Every structure is written in structure tokens, then in C-alpha cells.
């Protein structure tokens, strides 16, 4: 019999039903990718050879042509390794590991920003500069002054957001050096 191990009687490959379910999962993932904006696609670990097919799927509006293009996109995606597809699913998932890491990194940056703006801000700045010697000391001090000035004058929090962005980039660079993957943070606060 084809697909059976002669000695043990076990199936050597997945059943047709399992193969069909896997193909439908890839088709659904392709539809989800086609529904994303260019900025959202840029945050996902999508291989370069797949991006033109996703853009073509987004561009086509005719129902029948779009279904054919989605099927073609799914066919191209099935050629990829399962690890690549799993990484894309994980990055898209709100409960995935990448989302948890990203949320934790955002919380760390917020806590650091609050510590810098708190009563003991000088000590927090000293600790930050000791942990990140490559950080631009003058820029950080200027941002802290600007944030305090914004707060006293009731201005929009432009420097507050800029400080957060700078802290997030510092933490991402430190994460890259230690092997952590927090560099994928590209959201503006």
C-alpha cells in the first residue's frame, strides 16, 4: 500500500484531509496578509519574493480574479518553510511571543521614561548612561528639559513622545547586542 510502512503499518505522510487543512490555513493567512496595509506588512517577517504577490492581490478588485490571485499567493506561500509561515503567524498574533516581547519592551521604555521624569530623574539618567555608554547624553538632557517645559506650559507632548522614541531605540540596540529581538518595534507612541 502506498503511504504505509510495511513493518509497522503506520502512515508515512499526512492524510489528504490534513494536507487540505494545511493548504486552507495557508490560503487564510494569505487573505489576512492581503488585508494589511503596507506599513503593517513592513513590520512582519515576510520574505521579499512574496511581497509582489501580496501587492498584486491587494491591487486586484474583480472577485474572480482576486480569488485566483489569492490561490496563487497561497501556492507561493506553501513553497516557503513552515518556520517562516509560523513566524509570520506569530508576528500577526496578538497573543504570540513577538507581541508579548514587544509589549514588554514598550512597558520597559515607559517605566524608564517615568523614572527619568520622576523625582529621582538624575539617578535614573546616570544609570541609563552607564548602561548605554553610546547614548547621546546631550540629546537626552535636552529632551528631559523640553518635556518638563512642555508640562509647565501645558503644551502638546511632542518632546515626551520623542523621549520615548529615543529610549525605545536605545533599548532595541541593547537588545540586538544581547541577542534579544526587540528591534522589531516600529510603532510610534
Image: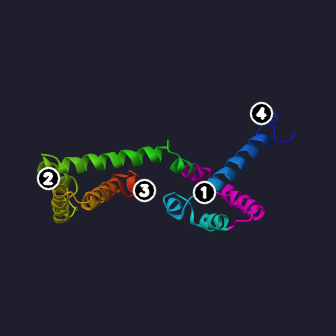
Q: Is residue 167 magenta?
A: no
Asked whether disc 1 touches disc 4, contact meaning CB atoms under 8 Å apart, the reply is no
Q: Left or right of 169: which side holds 136? A: left
Read off the residue under disc 3.
Answer: 184
Q: Which mark is residue 10?
A: 4
Is disc 2 surrounded by few (<14), some (14 to 19) or many (20+) residues within 10 Å?
few
Decide which of tag 3 and tag 1 comes sooner along the chain: 1
Decide which of tag 2 and tag 1 comes sooner along the chain: 1
Secondary structure state at the residue bearing disc 1: helix
Judged from this view, the residue extending furthest toward the right is: 1
* Percent coordinates x, y for residue 159 in the rendering: 24, 61
Q: What's the distance in space between the residues labelled 2 and 4, CA to CA?
A: 64 Å
Secondary structure state at the residue bearing disc 4: loop
> Which of the two residues, 23 or 2, is positioned nearer the viewer here?
23
> Which of the two residues, 46 or 4, is positioned nearer the viewer here?
46
Asked whether disc 2 touches disc 3, contact meaning CB atoms under 8 Å apart, the reply is no
Asked whether disc 2 touches disc 1, contact meaning CB atoms under 8 Å apart, the reply is no
Q: What's the distance in space between the residues labelled 3 and 4, CA to CA?
A: 43 Å
Q: What's the distance in space between the residues labelled 1 and 4, CA to CA?
A: 37 Å
Amino acid at each position: 500500500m502506498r503511504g504505509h510502512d510495511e513493518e509497522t503499518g503506520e502512515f508515512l505522510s499526512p492524510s489528504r484531509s490534513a494536507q487540505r487543512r494545511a493548504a486552507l490555513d495557508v490560503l487564510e493567512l494569505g487573505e489576512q496578509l492581503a488585508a494589511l496595509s503596507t506599513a503593517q506588512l513592513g513590520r512582519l517577517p515576510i520574505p521579499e519574493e512574496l511581497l509582489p504577490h501580496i501587492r498584486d492581490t491587494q491591487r486586484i478588485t474583480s472577485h474572480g480574479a482576486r480569488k485566483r490571485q489569492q490561490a496563487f499567493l497561497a501556492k507561493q506561500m506553501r513553497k516557503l518553510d513552515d518556520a517562516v509561515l509560523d513566524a509570520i503567524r506569530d508576528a500577526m498574533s496578538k497573543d504570540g511571543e513577538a507581541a508579548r516581547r514587544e509589549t514588554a519592551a514598550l512597558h520597559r521604555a515607559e517605566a524608564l521614561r517615568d523614572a527619568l521624569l520622576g523625582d529621582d530623574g538624575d539617578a535614573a539618567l546616570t544609570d541609563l548612561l552607564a548602561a548605554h555608554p553610546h547614548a547621546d547624553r546631550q540629546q537626552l538632557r535636552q529632551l528631559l528639559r523640553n518635556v518638563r517645559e512642555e508640562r509647565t506650559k501645558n503644551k502638546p507632548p511632542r518632546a515626551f513622545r520623542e523621549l520615548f522614541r529615543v529610549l525605545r531605540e536605545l533599548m532595541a540596540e541593547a537588545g540586538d547586542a544581547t541577542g534579544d529581538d526587540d528591534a522589531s518595534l516600529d510603532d510610534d507612541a
